[in-house]
Amino acid sequence: MSKFWSSMAKRATPYVPGEQPKEINVLKLNTNENPYPPSPAVASAITEELGKDLRLYPPPNAEDLREVIATTYDVTTENVFVGNGSDEVLAFAFMAFFEPGQTIRFPDITYSFYPVYATLFDIPYETVPVQRDFTLTTESFYQSEGGVIFPNPNAPTSLSLPLEEVKSIVENNPHTVVIVDEAYVDFAQQSAVELVNDYPNLLVVQTTSKSRSLAGLRVGYALGDEQLIQALIRMKDSFNSYTLDRLALAGAIASFKDQTYTEKTIQKIIATRSWITDEMTQLRFHVLPSETNFIFVSHEQYEANTLYNQLKEKNILVRYFDSPPIDQYLRITIGTDEEMQLFLKTLKEIINKLE
């Protein structure tokens, strides 16, 4: 560490994303990217925007995008905040709603960016143990001193907390903000967005990266009470008023306007998820009941690390976490049917050699 580093820089422990290989012959099932392209309307909108004057700044409040998101979720524009990917939205939320010195809570198996942000912003945190089946104990999140954040569905476990239990957590933290991170909710059954108008302490964060195939554009958003959204805007405008560029805005707006395409893509992924779950079960894998665009699996006989490395040697990447109690699990992104058939064929060959 340099003597010129600030205390914030010194205590930062950066998030480590999944591997991003440069090789083109690699099957990437490790970062939960959508295997299908975005709506054709996205490319058309971006091309049209390229023909305009890009020397001009984008609209700082992103009114058009906020309006189309509000229409999609049946809320008002004042209930919507947008940012440069949901990770940036989450960072602004940590700054806007969590206080240094007041302990927040999140699950001990969860999105690994939460402890990164908590440490960076000097916010103490308490990790709530998940149960043996990786489900959350709702009551453990009640009456948090500083607030609560959790993914629903959870990552990397793929499990979803029923909406009534989400509601219970919100109701039992009336004096602090509860952030529900719904990056994968489009592959699940219910969203907490329908609770936004009833609970002023609820913030729901979503992304266009997964179900809308726009990971490369970096567009995230939050839905919540108008006062919460105003706090996020204050954070953004104190950091960077122009967080979304004109091309990202154009592409995201086009995606939200083509909801039919998004729904078709979601249903294809869910169908493939069901098929690969059955196939993995027949291979004696334990597969958690996923409500995401990935599955979380362990094998009764073979080490997860062994399978991960064997697959990597065959140019197939999945995600392996080397910390207990999930060090015997692999997280596998749902690809196209053809990609999952190749994955399954390769996995069977590896298992046959290990027997």
Image (cartoon, rainbow, N blue to C red):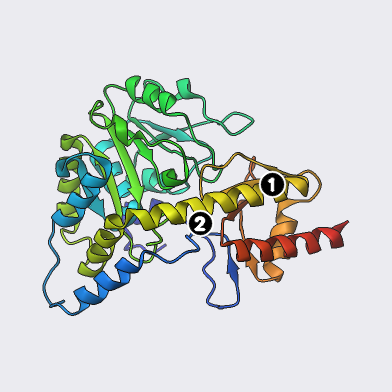
Q: Which residue is drawn at 21% across and 75% down?
A: 48
The label on residue 32 is 2
Identify the residue shown where x is 52% and y is 42%. Answer: 291
Q: Residues within 10 Å of mark 1 (few under 14, many from 20)?
A: few
Q: Nearer the viewer, residue 28 or 1?
A: 28
Q: Residue 278 carries which label?
A: 1
Where residue 196 sits: x, y (%)? 26, 32
Q: What is the secondary structure assignment of the residue under circle 1?
A: helix
Q: Position of residue 302 (x, y in %)?
A: 79, 50
| 293 versus 123 height, above or below | below
Which one is in front, 267 or 131?
Answer: 267
Q: Quadrant of residue 197?
A: top left
Please state which amino acid type lies under the numbered disc 1.
Asp
Q: What residue type is labelled 2?
A: Asn
Hey, which quadrant is residue 169 in on the image? Answer: top left
- Can residue 328 be seen here? no
Pinpoint residue 166: horizontal percent, then vertical percent.
40, 28
- Please report the residue visible at 51 percent of the width from the left and 68 percent of the height from the top: 20
Quick one: quadrant of the N terminus?
Answer: bottom left
Q: Which residue lies furthest to the right in this view?
A: 355
Q: How many marks?
A: 2
Q: Picture quarter containing residue 352?
A: bottom right
Residue 108 visible, this angle? yes
